[in-house]
Image (spheres, grey):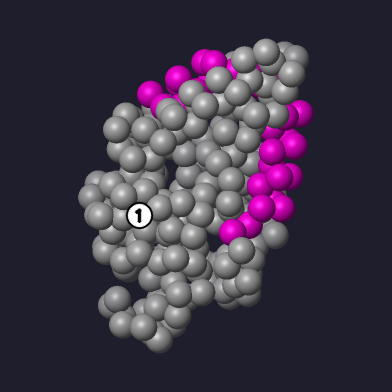
Amino acid sequence: MTGGFPHLIFDFDSTLVTIEALDELAARALKGHPNRDGILDEIRRITALCMEGEISFHESLSRRLAIFRAHKSDVEAIAELARNSPSASVARNKDFFQKYRGRIHVISGGFDEMIFPFARDFGIPAEHIRANAFAYDDNEWIVGIEENRLTAKDHGKALALKSLRLKGEIIAIGDGWTDYEMKTLGGAAHFFAFAENTMRGAVVSHADRVFENFDSLRKFLDGGDS
């Protein structure tokens, strides 16, 4: 790393938290559905294809949202689940997020409503979050997403990072291909793979470093491991 503390750009799902929130939303919304298991398997398969860089994020999101129907109350329940599902090592280092809150951002293909409660608990400012937003009908059923968000587009995380116009060294941290794209397309100096919850071979092979938990990442950032 160069001089000064870097900007840290975190993924959310399977990085700061243990869950994939959209998958959990589908699981809740499909409760009682006769083909629930089959649909959930397909959703997880599509998620994995995107995270490994096999299909675009926009295609992945569109395909997943097309095969289940969810209500705003389901979204609120999963937001609370995410809030209570921090990655174990992230929870141990809550003070780090509060100390460096001005240098920490979250860029996610997930959704504002599911991220904000967690972010508030960890002292991450709302203005430091770039994510998607659901579109609802008059009865609060999800009918799509707000297509104007940068994060809704292909290579959206990279586009969102560029839009921040951050000065200084930038490190992207996450478990998926779109996190790696923040280095190749978004201007991050480094991409660190976070492997506490999942390890994707195609992603890890392109990472500058791989961290099995936040403790080891913090040690590195604090200069304890060069």
- Give the residue displayed 31% in from the left and 66% down from the top: 209
- Give the residue displayed 63% in from the left and 57% down from the top: 86
Judge from the rendering whether residue 25 lies leftward or rightward of residue 145; answer left or right: right
Helix, strand or loop status at disc 1: loop
Q: Is residue 215 highlighted in magenta?
A: no
The C terminus is located in which quarter? bottom left
* Residue 54 image-quadrant placement: top left
Range drawn in magenta: 59-87
The location of residue 223, given as percent across then percent down, is 39, 85
Q: Is residue 163 visible to us here?
A: no
Magenta span main SS: helix
**Outermost residue to the bottom:** 224
Q: Is residue 200 visible to us here?
A: yes
The 10 Å Cα crowd at callout 1, few under 14, some 14 to 19, many 20 or more, is: few
- Give the residue displayed 54% in from the left and 16% down from the top: 67
* Residue 143 image-quadrant placement: top right
The location of residue 197, given as percent across then percent down, is 51, 54
Frontmost residue, 114 versus 49:
49
Q: Is residue 74 highlighted in magenta?
A: yes
Q: Circle 1 sits on which residue?
A: 165
Frontmost residue, 99 versus 81:
81
* Residue 206 image-quadrant placement: bottom left
